[in-house]
């Protein structure tokens, strides 16, 4: 009888530890979800007309959680803009500091050892890098042009497609991501 009671006690103790583990683990997930939700809501309130607002990364810097948030405007145009907000938490509340301009004013600033990391950079580079006069002629001032990008990680190549909604023509620009340069410019013909 005493042995059976001891077994029941051990089983109850095990179940209590198991239940405790199940109950506490989701609290961290809920806290992370609430943290992310608060940051996204704050970014949306500061940038209500942005096309895309999303968390890029969360890093630990000198004991402070730094959450980087992507804010992008005009994402289907020839001149998209991309900013990065950095939220430092918890010691500084939800402090963002000055937004970092990744792409602005239809300029892609680069050096020969640069890497095109973001689609906004690829779009602007596709018509501003050396050797893109044919692309500039095709897109004009950007009216009636929509843009789509693809990144191929196996070859480290960006593909930017400029589609003219009036003429129903597409121009494909292929760009080397590392040490950016134009690889191919091709006008695609619909058949």
Image: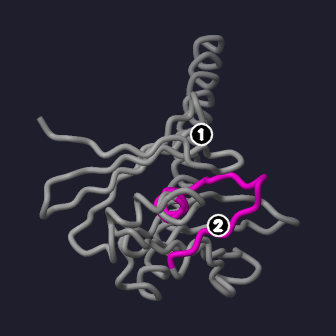
What SS does tag 2 mark? Answer: strand
Give the label on residue 67, or none: 2
The correct choice, above or below, for 31 with respect to 12 in the image is below
C-alpha gap between disc 2 and disc 1: 27 Å
Q: Within 10 Å of the Cα at label 2, are there few (<14), some (14-19), or many (20+) other Cα atoms?
A: many
Q: Quadrant of residue 101?
A: bottom right
**What residue is shown at x 64% (from left), y 23% (from top)?**
10
Report the front residue among 4 and 27. 27
**What residue is shown at x 56% (from left), y 48% (from top)?**
182
Determine if residue 99 is in view. Answer: yes
Q: Is residue 8 left or right of residue 40?
A: right
Instruction: Give the quadrant of the N terminus.
Output: top right
Q: Which residue is mark 1?
A: 21
Q: Position of residue 41 (x, y in %)?
A: 43, 78
Q: Position of residue 118 (x, y in %)?
A: 55, 57
Residue extending furthest toward the right: 62
Report the front residue among 144 and 49. 144
Determine if residue 95 is in view. Answer: no
Q: Which residues are magenta?
A: 106-125
**Count of numbered badges drawn on the protein:** 2
């Amino acid at each position: 009888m005493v042995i059976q009671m001891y077994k029941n006690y051990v089983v109850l103790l095990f179940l209590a530890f198991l239940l405790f583990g199940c109950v506490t683990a989701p609290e961290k997930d809920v806290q992370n979800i609430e943290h992310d939700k608060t940051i996204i809501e704050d970014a949306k309130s500061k940038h209500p007309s942005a096309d895309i607002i999303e968390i890029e990364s969360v890093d630990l810097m000198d004991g402070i959680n730094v959450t980087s948030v992507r804010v992008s405007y005009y994402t289907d145009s020839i001149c998209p803009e991309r900013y990065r907000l950095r939220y430092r938490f918890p010691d500084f509340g939800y402090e963002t500091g000055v937004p970092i301009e990744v792409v602005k004013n239809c300029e892609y600033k680069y050096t020969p050892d640069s890497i095109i990391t973001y689609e906004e950079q690829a779009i602007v580079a596709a018509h501003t890098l050396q050797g893109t006069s044919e692309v500039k002629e095709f897109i004009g001032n950007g009216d009636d042009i929509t843009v789509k990008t693809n990144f191929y990680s196996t070859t480290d190549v960006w593909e930017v497609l400029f589609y003219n909604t009036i003429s129903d023509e597409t121009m494909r620009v292929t760009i080397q991501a590392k040490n950016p340069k134009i690889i191919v410019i091709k006008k695609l013909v619909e058949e």
